[in-house]
Amino acid sequence: MLSVQHELHGQKPLEGKVLMAIFAHPDDEGTVAPILAKYSREGAQIHLVTVTDGRYGSNEFNNHMEGDTLVAIRREELKCSAAILGAKLRHLDYHDQLRAAEGYDGHIPQARGIIKDLNAIIEEVKPDVLITWGPDGWSNHMDHRLVGASVTQVYLSKNWEKPMSLYFCGVPSDLIENPEERMLHGLERKYLTTKVAFTDEDLDKAYLSHKCHKSQINPETTKEDLKKNWYKNSMFIYLRKFEGPKETSDTVFD
C-alpha cells in the first residue's frame, strides 16, 4: 500500500533520506555504484565524498602517467561518474598515499585533516546512512583502510544529534576462490547481514559510471566483465552494519 500511495502522489519511496558514501580514490565508488544508482532512483539524496587526488593511479591504460596531469584527468572522470550515479560530489584534495613516505610530519597532518574535514562534511549534510570501507579496505590498500577508519572515528567521536547508520562494504568469503585472498579481504556471511539487491537498470548505470574512469580501466571491459569481476555474477551488494554495544559490562568475557 505504501508504494502505491507514493506513486499516486508522485513521490519516490526514499524521498527525504540522505546517503553518504565516503571512499579514498576516484573510481572507488564503483564498489557500491549499483546501489548508489538504486537509491538515487528511489528518491534518496546521494552524496559521494572522495578523499584523495588519485595522482598515483599509474597503469598501462594511461601510459603509466603520474602527478598533476593525472590528478586533473581523474577529477573530471569522477565528476562524470558521480553525475551518472545521481550523486552530489565532494572531492577533497588529499595526496595519494597521504604523504606516508614523508614520515610523521608528512603523514599525520593528512590523517588528522581527513578526520576534521569528514567531521565538518557530515555535520553539514546530516546523512541518515554512511557507507565506507571496513578494516580490510576491500583490497588492503592503505588509503582505503585509513579512510574507512577515519569515517568510523568521526561516527564514534560523539553522540550525533541526528541518528546515523554506518555500513562497511565487503565481499563474502565464499565468493573468493583463492584461500590467501579470502583471508586477506573476505568476510563471513554472518557478518554481512545487509544484502541489497539491485536491478539491470542500476547495473547499467554502474557500468556507465565505471566507463567514465578511462585512465584506469581496460576500454574493452564489458558490462558482463564488470558483473563477473566486481559483483561475482550476483545482483547484490553486501554490507556489514556497525553495531554498537547495547549495554555496559564489567568483563570482556561473555
Image (cartoon, rainbow, N blue to C red):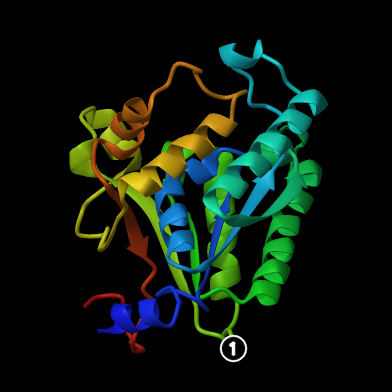
Judge from the rendering whether residue 54 lies leftward or rightward of residue 222; answer left or right. right
Judge from the rendering whether residue 153 lies leftward or rightward of residue 253; answer left or right. right
Residue drawn at the location 78% of the way across and 32% of the way down: 72
Report which quarter residue 246 is drawn in: bottom left
Judge from the rendering whether residue 235 lies leftward or rightward of residue 215; answer left or right. left
In the rendered view of the protein, which quadrant contains the N terminus? bottom left
Q: Position of residue 228 (x, y in %)?
A: 29, 30
For residue 217, above or below residue 153: above
Judge from the rendering whether residue 165 lies leftward or rightward of residue 69; answer left or right. left
Residue drawn at the location 56% of the way across and 38% of the way down: 27
Disc 1 designates what residue? 161
Q: Nearer the viewer, residue 86 or 178?
A: 86
**Tag 1 secondary structure:** loop
Residue drawn at the location 40% of the way across and 75% of the way down: 13
The answer, for residue 232, to whether it is visible in the render is yes
Residue drawn at the location 20% of the way across and 54% of the way down: 189
Q: Amino acid at mark 1?
A: Glu
Q: Position of residue 3 (x, y in %)?
A: 31, 78
Q: Nearer the viewer, residue 13 or 109?
A: 13
Q: Specify the farthest residue to the front.
A: 8
In the rendered view of the protein, which quadrant contains the C terminus? bottom left
The answer, for residue 133, to whether it is visible in the render is no
Q: Position of residue 248 (x, y in %)?
A: 36, 89
For label 1, the crowd category at 10 Å Cα-Cα, with few meaning under 14, some 14 to 19 and many 20 or more, is: few
Q: Position of residue 204 (x, y in %)?
A: 40, 40
Report which quarter residue 196 is drawn in: bottom left
Report which quarter residue 107 is drawn in: top right
